[in-house]
Image (cartoon, grey):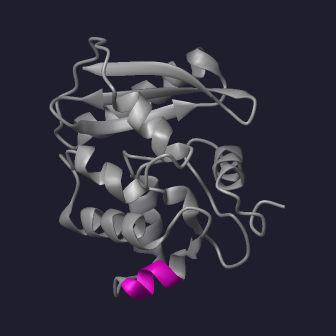
Amino acid sequence: MISIEKFEILGREIWIAVIFEQKIDGLTFSLDGYEYLKERINSLKALLEHRKVLVNLVEEKTDYPEIVYNALVGRIENEDALEFLSFRGITPFERKVYEILTKKVKRGSVITYGELAKMLSTSPRAIGNAMRRNPYPIIVPCHRVVLKSGLGNYTPKKEYKKVLLELEGVKVWTS
């Protein structure tokens, strides 16, 4: 199933789509309108299906988009939203990375790929790969993982990473 809603942040529309069965299997968002959201949904569907998660895109209204929005604007802690995630199709390593990131790197702060890698006794490249494959952006705050020298990449757009960090009050990495 999929649940889609439109909200507003920083004077902009944000569309949030959540694919779920009993819990959230994946989510995506768009700051560039509904048409771009449809592209993002197709990418998320492909990622989930590649990971052997069956996806049914029949629309059903749920509270999931609002839960994501509430995490986005700081009404709930990202860590408190973890309980809504299914973690289906996620490797044990990715789950560990996502849980540590979500529990340790709070709203308004960032961590480098290298620092997170050191916490998990792995490589920055492995962290980057886990971030790139994150099916739970916003709740699992991969936008808070940055390079030593700048923002680093972000799927779907680097501009989105900057907007998310600005919304959280992070100034150093967004100016």
Q: In which quarter of the image is the C terminus?
A: bottom right
Position of 109 relative to 85 (above/below): below
**Residue furthest toward the right?**
175
Secondary structure that dominates the magenta span: helix
Quadrant of residue 144 within the rendered picture? bottom right
Residue 86 drawn at (x, y percent): 20, 45
Quadrant of residue 170 within the rendered picture? bottom right
For residue 63, side relative to residue 112 (left or right): left
Region of the chain picked out in magenta, as a range? 115-119
Q: Which of 133 and 120 is in front in this view?
A: 120
Residue 165 drawn at (x, y percent): 66, 55
At a point 52% along the width and 82% down the height, the residue shown is 114
For residue 92, side relative to residue 119 (left or right): left
For residue 101, side relative to residue 9 (left or right): left
Residue 3 drawn at (x, y percent): 35, 20
Position of 67 relative to 104 (above/below): above
At a point 43% along the width and 70% down the height, the residue shown is 127
At a point 35% along the width and 71% down the height, the residue shown is 100
Count the numbered circles shown: 0
Q: In which quarter of the image is the N terminus?
A: top left
Is residue 139 inside the magenta stretch? no
For residue 77, side relative to residue 107 (left or right): left
Q: Nearer the viewer, residue 66 or 156?
A: 66
At a point 70% along the width and 58% down the height, the residue shown is 169
Position of 14 relative to 33 (above/below): below
Position of 26 relative to 105 (above/below): above
